[in-house]
Image (cartoon, helix red, strand yellow):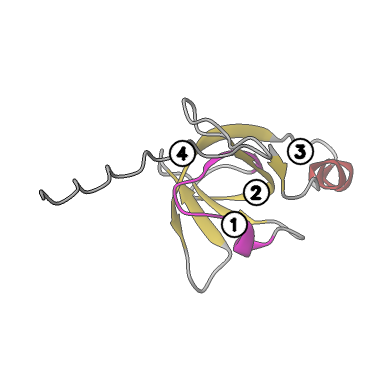
């Protein structure tokens, strides 16, 4: 799991009674000119301080820690998660060899 940033603790310390919530989903939209992204259930998030939009990928499975409710919530952390059923590449693994094409037949004498 790749951790983009953990600033939720700082937000909780500053926010007092604010409580963080978590949601898991797939990124379906990343706004080109804003720090906003949308997950597959329709929730929209703005990136909190220190989070970089360049690390988000369309279609990525993510766990979002966020504050607020309503149409636009503030993400305090975004974890990129593995996609269920997809195998992560193993470091140093070698792809299986592809069998060579059969040699052409020798011409008849």
Q: Which residue is mark 4?
A: 97
Q: Nearer the viewer, residue 82 or 98?
A: 98
Snapshot quadrant of residue 24: top right
- Tag 1, which secondary structure? strand
The residue indicated by pointer 2 is 75
| Picture coordinates of residue 96, whole percent (x, y) | 48, 36
- Asked whether residue 30 is drawn in magenta, I would say no
What's the distance in space between the residues labelled 3 and 4, CA to CA? 55 Å
What residue did someone put label 1 on? 46
Q: For the point 77% across and 49% down, which residue is it?
A: 5
Q: Tell me where the magenta segment starts and ends, as one range.
A: 52-67
Residue in front for this viewpoint, 9 or 13:
9
Numbered mark located on residue 18 in the image: 3
Magenta residue check for 61: yes
Residues under numbered marks 1 and 2 in contact, where contact means CB atoms less than 8 Å apart: yes
Task: Assign a secondary structure to mark 4.
Answer: loop
Where residue 46 sits: x, y (%)? 59, 57
86 vs 64, left or right, is left
Q: In the structure shown, which secondary structural element does the residue marked by tag 3 occupy?
A: loop
Q: Quadrant of the N terminus?
A: top right
- Determine contact: label 4, label 1, CB under 8 Å: no
SS of the residue at dot 2?
strand
Q: Based on the displayed image, in which of its 4 quarters is residue 62 positioned? A: top right
Callout 1: few (<14), some (14-19), or many (20+) C-alpha neighbours within 10 Å?
A: some
**10 Å crowding of disc 2: few (<14), some (14-19), many (20+):** many
Q: Say whether disc 2 or disc 3 marks the residue closer to the N-terminus.
A: 3
Q: Nearer the viewer, residue 14 or 88?
A: 88
Q: CA distance from mark 1 to mark 2?
A: 6 Å
Q: Residue at x 75, y 60 (%)?
A: 49
């Amino acid at each position: 799991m790749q951790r983009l940033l953990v600033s939720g603790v700082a937000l909780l310390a500053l926010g007092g009674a604010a409580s963080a919530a978590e949601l898991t989903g797939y990124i379906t939209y990343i706004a080109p000119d804003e720090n906003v992204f949308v997950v597959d259930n329709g929730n929209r998030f703005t990136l909190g301080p220190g989070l970089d939009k360049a690390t988000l990928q369309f279609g990525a499975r993510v766990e979002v820690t966020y504050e607020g409710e309503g149409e636009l919530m503030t993400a305090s952390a975004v974890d990129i998660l593995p996609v269920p059923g997809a195998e992560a590449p193993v470091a140093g693994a070698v792809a299986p060899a592809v069998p060579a094409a059969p040699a052409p037949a020798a011409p008849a004498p």
